[in-house]
Image: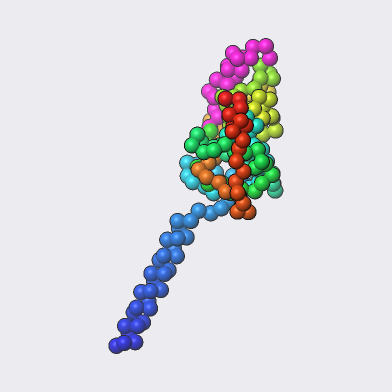
Amino acid sequence: MKQLLMFTLLALLLAACGQKQETETAGSTEIMTVSMLLEAPEEHIDQEVVLEGTVTHVCKHGGRRLHLTHLEPNLRLRIEAPENMSAFARELEGSDIVVTGLLRETRIDEQYLDEWEAELYEDNTDDPDHADDPDHADDPDPEAEHEHDGHVEPRGLAVVDEMREELAASGKPYISRYYVDAVTYVMKDGGNIPVAIPDESEEGK
């Protein structure tokens, strides 16, 4: 009788431990690289993701965004700092960090591009082909440098035309661009997060 009782208690204990382990595993979030996330980003839209990568760019004015890059194969994703988060320090460039945040999607369709083109003509009548557009922050051209604040932004009618071609080739009514609204981040090596200089975060406002 005692042996039966002991076996029963042992079975219950093992079952409880297994259940706890399953709960902890289910509740944990996988740490992904940018390339892993971009393999199927639609599965994570508006959901919390945890990303690791190298900071290859921090916005020069304001520090409200950075580029998190998977160096091989050189894929990057824009990370946005919400108003309740401190600005990103320029010293983060070159560092490896782990970011927790919500994946967001911007859908670019014909209406979006028409409005963008109209704004370029309205605000930059002298030379819309070389105009910068601060209102469309979806990073369609990751190589273009915004001359006013240093972060990557689309530039001029050439980029609008390129995106029209991409939209037509996609066979869909829109093309998607993704970014992450950061919730928190840490240094991958466990070190202290550099603090943005106040003047740096306020410059350009």
Q: Is residue 131 above or below residue 84?
A: above
Q: Residue furthest left?
A: 1
Q: Quadrant of the C terminus?
A: top right
**Could you say which is closer to the camera, residue 152 or residue 108?**
152
Residue 30 visible: yes
Q: Is residue 175 magenta?
A: no
Q: Is residue 2 left or right of residue 179?
A: left
Q: Is residue 109 magenta?
A: yes
Q: Is residue 50 above or below residue 87?
A: below
Q: How is the image coloured?
A: rainbow
Q: Residue at horizontal 65%, vertical 48%?
A: 96
Q: Quadrant of the N terminus?
A: bottom left
Q: Residue at horizontal 68%, vertical 14%?
A: 127
**Could you say which is closer to the camera, residue 69 or residue 84?**
84
Query: Which residues, given as a range, are shown in magenta?
Result: 107-127
Residue 6 drawn at (x, y percent): 35, 83
Q: Quadrant of residue 117?
A: top right
